[in-house]
Amino acid sequence: MTIEQDIKTKNAAEFETRQDDVFGRIADRYDLLCDLFSFGIHRIWKRRVAALIAKENWAQLLDCATGTGDIILRVVNHKKLNLNQKIIASDISLQMLEIAKKRLLSTKEQIEFQILDAHSLPSIPDESVDLYSISLGLKICEREQVLKEAMRVLRPGGRFVSLEASNIPIKWLHKLYLLYMRLVMPIVGWLATGGDVSAYKYLLQGIEKFPTAEVLANELSALGFEEVYFQRLTFGIVAIHVARKPSRI
Ligand SMILES: C[S@@+](CC[C@H](N)C(=O)[O-])C[C@H]1O[C@@H](n2cnc3c(N)ncnc32)[C@H](O)[C@@H]1O
């Protein structure tokens, strides 16, 4: 296997929920951990993603690995949903989804909550989704499989939006950032979770091993997505990738 293939098929964090239900254990502290690990900056990233989603023309949105519903919450706060707009909020963790349900109580008529593994979405028919989003979930999944499943469920012309860890293009700054994360994250994570090492181990590995924004864009194109572009946020610590499933001719 070439290095390129190896990167393509790997789960950056080598994470598998069935082996370690870390999100189930930390669900009630997840939002606090996001604030601590990112100094609250994740709120800006997610607001940007939500604004992108809100301005798109969709009737059916699927948010995979939705967690506590942070993205959807911001989408519905950004713009009141039309009566014809429906959202599926899905996650593999029941505990995370239960929190999302509570947070999204006011719009529950238009939101369906489904326990789903992003690698295989059997309850979602082919070409039934106008916009597929995944935020901070790709690095803990087998990317290629998840992206192929996104392609399957998207209707022709449908949009793909992801937010994920990325690379700071200035190499020395990226190295400094990783060093900082290696030093600080274990301390903050240890204190905030009462010693649950998994909570930061996967995150750290996912950040270190996730491909650059350019490589992820190439992967999307190689899988058949069109109009692929990305925006780096906070120097490139994360990137938003947007792509479109080709329309039928
Ligand atoms: C880092 S959190 C991101 C949550 C949310 N999207 C956000 O931006 O805050 C990752 C989420 O992915 C979920 N997850 C992990 N593996 C998954 C899988 N195979 N399929 C679907 N969700 C998964 C976890 O349960 C967790 O809620």
Image (spheres, helix red, strand yellow):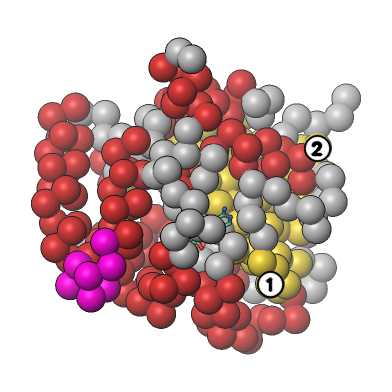
Q: Is mark 2 within 8 Å of ligand 1?
A: no
Magenta-highlighted residues: 190-197
User: How many numbered discs sit on the rendered protein?
Assistant: 2
Q: Earlier in the sequence, mark 2 or mark 1?
A: 1
Query: Is 124 rendered above or below residue 219?
Result: below
Q: Disc 2 marks which residue? A: 156
Q: Name which quarter of the figure residue 150 lies in.
A: top right
- Looking at the image, the residue that sits furthest to the top is 2
- Asked whether residue 73 appears in the rendered view, the answer is no
Residue type of the residue flagged with mark 1: Phe
Where residue 8 sits: x, y (%)? Answer: 50, 27
Q: Is mark 1 within 8 Å of ligand 1?
A: no
Residue type of the residue flagged with mark 2: Pro
Q: Disc 1 marks which residue? A: 113
Relative to 122, is 41 on the left or the right? left
In this view, the mark in front (2 or 1): 1
In reply to whether residue 70 is colored magenta, the answer given is no
- Asked whether residue 210 appears in the rendered view, the answer is yes
Crowding near the residue tagged with mark 1, few <14, some 14–19, many ≥20 C-alpha atoms within 10 Å? some
Q: Name which quarter of the figure residue 172 lies in.
A: top left
Residue at 83%, 44% in the rendered image: 127
Q: Secondary structure at mark 2?
A: strand
Where residue 231 sits: x, y (%)? Answer: 42, 39
The residue lying toward the viewer, choosing from 12 and 32, is 12
Residue at 16%, 34% in the rendered image: 175
